[in-house]
Image: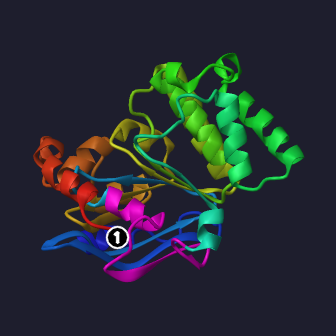
Amino acid sequence: MTANLTSAASSAGSGSEMIRFDGVTRRFGPKTAVDGLDLTVRAGELFAFLGPNGAGKTTSIKMLCGLLKPTSGTITLGGYAAGSAEARAMLAYVPDQPFLYDKLTGREFLSFVTRMYGMDANRAAERTKELVRMFEIESFLDELCEGYSQGMKQRLVFASALVHEPKVLVVDEPFVGLDPRSARIVKRMFVEQARSGVAVLMSIHLLSIAEDLADRIGIIHKGRLIADGKLAQLRETLSHTGSLEDLFLQLTDGDPAADAEEKAPETFEEQGPP
């Protein structure tokens, strides 16, 4: 069944290949966190990366961003090796726990990021204005970040991630702690980025959002990619007419408690050596 599901993933999205995993394995001592991962995401595609805790999502994302090296296999962004200067220039990464400088205002933080990227001052000012409007952050932009709510922080972090106009956007659990307004703004942003040609890889536990937004879905379980394709393809292959949640539970042993049971391996994954 796994082979059929993964083969259903064909060439979703007509853009060029922007993310590519070729036979990627990552081990931490005796534990194999990612096992022979083959995966591509194309320009203009919004890809939802799903799996129980401990499945290998975060390790895969860290390798993609150059924060970890694969034990074997290769990862490229736009044809460049993950972690290279060329790959970093086209990448935006938003982790599940974004970092801000508490004693800077939002405006100062955005200015700092544009300088870090070496952006032209005029273009930086234009782009900042665009993002302030997109994420509706003008009302608190001149307040210190230490006073921001979770939703305010997340919106500012997304603005800072997009300021250099990346071609690849990678996000890990982007909706944690967001209020409904912030969540709607972030969802709209994902769709707009993908439609503008950005390759978006979103790791998420909220399956209803993945079902609503994703062009393509990949499910990783125990380090292996067990399903990859459009939701309609996966339903057809499995003769499944229910929700993505039902399909997900069926593929991951049908255990709704899988997340809780596999929390310990995810923690080990996070703390493993680089």
**SS for dot 1:** helix
Q: Is residue 183 above or below residue 111?
A: above
Relative placement, left or right, of 195 versus 172 is right
Identify the residue at image location x=28%, y=53%: 51
Q: In the rendered image, which quarter is residue 268 located in?
A: bottom left
- In the displayed structure image, the side of residue 4 where residue 15 appears, left or right: right
Residue at 66 percent across and 56 percent down: it is 166
Please tell me which residue lies in front, 198 or 212: 198
Q: Is residue 75 above or below residue 256?
A: below
Residue at the extreme front of the image, as rendered: 103
Q: Position of residue 145 (x, y in %)?
A: 56, 26
Question: Do we see residue 159 in this rendering?
Answer: yes
Q: Tell whether position 271 is magenta.
A: no
Type of amino acid under label 1: Thr
Say few, some or many: other residues with alpha carbon within 10 Å of mark 1 (under 14 / 14 to 19 / 20 or more).
some
State left or right for residue 92 relative to residue 37.
right
Q: Where residue 130 sits: x, y (%)?
A: 78, 36
The image quarter in which residue 79 lies: bottom right
Residue position marked by numbered label 1 in the rendering: 6
The quarter of the image holding the N terminus is bottom left
Residue extent of the magenta highlight: 58-83
Say which of 197 and 11 sits in front.
197
Residue 78 included in the magenta stretch of the image:
yes
Q: Of residues 215 and 260, which is closer to you in this image? A: 260
How did the renderer colour the structure?
Answer: rainbow
Q: Is residue 147 left or right of residue 86?
A: left
Residue 242 visible, this angle: no
Question: Splitting the image into 4 quarters, where does residue 220 fall?
Answer: bottom left
Image quadrant for the C terminus? bottom left
